[in-house]
């Protein structure tokens, strides 16, 4: 059973047993192994490990059976498999590069509720496989298979990469870390396993919430939803913690909260990291950021001597631009942070390390470090249900034609004291709006003006 709607723009994801099952996992395993091996070229074709695929899984209740079926499909495609077990998604990117395989598949549904599961597929060097870079081909192969029978000639090797992965993460850590008290909400996701394993020996005091990894969630494992942060904010205040961090389900994203319990937008976090990274590059280098980010990000990059590179929303675009421009790092409003020195991939754990470094190098509190960066007023992302998305974008272009307009992702309209980006959802009848202004009055005025065209925001 495969509901073709599970094939998204960047991964495969849906409701287990309702939209896909182990039979679908087998077919996806067969198809992904066939696709990944077919893209080997030249020198790589002759390397033994390059003919293999890495497989990992998160802590969801159905991940073991889906992983088993996925691996069996790969073996029936004649492909060797390196099974690296229960891991956070960034460990998959590390494993692909560590072993030199042609790619890997992580069984995960990231931040979705417990009923969901899915597959994140990466190619050689952990390059993302999305609709435009192979996922459409994998979908075609998987949905064309008539049965799940075959001769499993590929071999399986089980490997625990914990120590190697821990060493990779901690190589970014400064030697002199202050004895910080850090509150962590693991969201009952993979951070519940990885944070104690990686950071448990450091001279920091960890206070961890929702550490269990039994496939159930006390709150949805999405740190961008404000109500999911309530428990962490209470812990920060109760423990007088220096900082709080909330991870998503597969621990490739995080959101930070200051010592007063105030959430920090991930674009503001990007701006905070800019001078820290560019100082290491002799006050030069490129930083990539997604186009929903605050004006403050570009301003901080230029101020630090760097080159700002604005990009479309989505990890496949961010990673490609990071690689193509040799950028030192990149930040996305969704909480994904990307690093040149970690295979141009995103990592919640490495972001955590860099935050520890930044706080240890400063005598200021988190709120004091962030205060100068909160110089604009933002709407947050609002969804508007629109039947004809293209027609609405044309109407907005006409209405605000006296502004500076670009079409990098949806439309972005800029004026001297405010800007707005409106982009269509890939999978839903929504236009997603992000707006920023130099004053709260201008923000409210222009948002009200846009609502006369778009209607009221949807409640989700």
Image: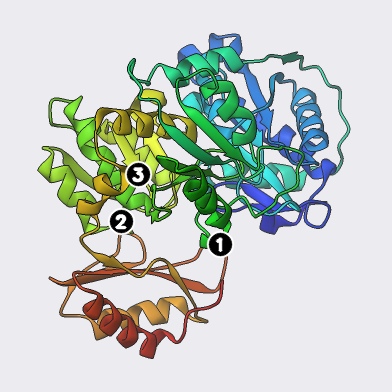
> Is disc 1 surrounded by few (<14), some (14 to 19) or many (20+) residues within 10 Å?
few
Q: Nearer the viewer, mark 1 or mark 2?
A: 1
Q: Is residue 220 left or right of residue 315?
A: right
The image shows residue 213 at horizontal and vertical percentages of 72, 37
Number of on-image labels: 3
Q: Earlier in the sequence, mark 1 or mark 2?
A: 1
CB under 8 Å between discs 3 and 1: no
Q: Which mark is residue 258?
A: none
Dividing the picture into quadrants, the one containing residue 147 is top right
Residue at label 3?
A: 331
410 and 356: which is toward the camera: 356
117 and 170: which is toward the camera: 170
125 and 58: which is toward the camera: 58
CA separation in Å, label 3 and label 1? 23 Å
Q: Which mark is residue 293?
A: 2
Secondary structure under the numbered disc 1 in the rendered image: helix
Dividing the picture into quadrants, the one containing residue 66 is top right
Q: Which mark is residue 227?
A: 1
The image shows residue 83 at horizontal and vertical percentages of 70, 21
Secondary structure under the numbered disc 2 in the rendered image: loop
Residue at 71% across, 47% down: 117
CA separation in Å, label 1 and label 2? 22 Å
Residue at 51% across, 73% down: 430
> Is disc 2 surrounded by few (<14), some (14 to 19) or many (20+) residues within 10 Å?
many
Q: Earlier in the sequence, mark 3 or mark 1?
A: 1
Dividing the picture into quadrants, the one containing residue 322 is top left
CB under 8 Å between discs 2 and 3: yes
- Residue 459 visible in the shown view: yes
The structure's colour scheme is: rainbow
Residue at 40% across, 81% down: 392
CA separation in Å, label 2 and label 3? 9 Å
Secondary structure under the numbered disc 3 in the rendered image: strand
């Amino acid at each position: 059973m495969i509901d073709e709607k599970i094939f998204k723009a960047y991964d495969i994801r849906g409701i287990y047993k309702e939209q896909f099952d182990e039979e679908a996992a087998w077919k996806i395993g067969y198809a992904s192994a066939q696709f990944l091996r077919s893209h080997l070229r030249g020198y790589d074709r002759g390397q033994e490990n390059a003919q293999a695929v890495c497989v990992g899984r998160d802590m969801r209740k159905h991940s073991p059976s889906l992983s088993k079926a996925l691996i069996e499909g790969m073996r029936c495609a004649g492909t060797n498999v390196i099974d690296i077990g229960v891991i956070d998604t960034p460990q998959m990117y590390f494993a692909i590069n560590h072993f030199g395989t042609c790619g890997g598949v992580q069984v995960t549904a990231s931040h979705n509720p417990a009923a969901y599961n899915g597959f994140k597929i990466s190619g050689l060097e952990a390059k993302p496989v999305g609709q435009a870079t192979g996922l459409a081909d994998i979908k075609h192969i998987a949905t064309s298979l008539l049965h799940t029978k075959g001769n499993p000639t590929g071999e399986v090797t089980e490997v625990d990469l914990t120590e190697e992965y821990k060493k990779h993460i901690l190589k970014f850590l400064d030697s002199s870390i202050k004895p910080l008290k850090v509150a962590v909400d693991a969201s009952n996701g993979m951070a519940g396993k990885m944070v104690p394993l990686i950071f448990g020996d450091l001279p920091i005091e960890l206070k961890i919430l929702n550490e269990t990894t039994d496939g159930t969630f006390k709150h949805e494992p999405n740190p961008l939803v404000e109500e999911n942060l309530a428990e962490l904010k209470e812990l920060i205040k109760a423990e007088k913690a220096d900082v709080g961090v909330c991870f998503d389900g597969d621990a490739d994203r995080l959101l930070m909260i200051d010592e007063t319990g105030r959430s920090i937008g991930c674009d503001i976090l990007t701006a905070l990291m800019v001078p820290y990274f560019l100082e290491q590059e002799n006050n030069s280098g490129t930083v990539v950021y997604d186009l929903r980010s605050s004006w403050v990000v570009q301003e901080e990059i230029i101020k630090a001597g760097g080159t700002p590179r604005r990009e479309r929303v989505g990890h496949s675009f961010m990673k490609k631009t990071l690689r193509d421009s040799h950028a030192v790092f990149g930040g996305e409003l969704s909480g994904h942070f990307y690093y040149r020195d970690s295979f141009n991939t995103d990592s919640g754990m490495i972001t955590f390390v860099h935050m520890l470094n930044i706080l240890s190098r400063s005598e200021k509190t988190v709120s004091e470090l962030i205060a100068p960066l909160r110089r604009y007023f933002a709407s947050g992302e609002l969804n508007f249900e629109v039947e004809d998305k293209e027609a609405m974008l044309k109407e907005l272009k006409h209405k605000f034609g006296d502004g500076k307009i670009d079409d990098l992702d949806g439309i972005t309209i800029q004026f001297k004291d405010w800007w707005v980006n409106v982009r269509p959802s890939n999978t839903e009848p929504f236009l997603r709006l992000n707006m920023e202004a130099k004053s709260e009055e201008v923000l409210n005025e222009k948002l009200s003006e846009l609502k006369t065209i778009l209607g009221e925001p949807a409640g989700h």
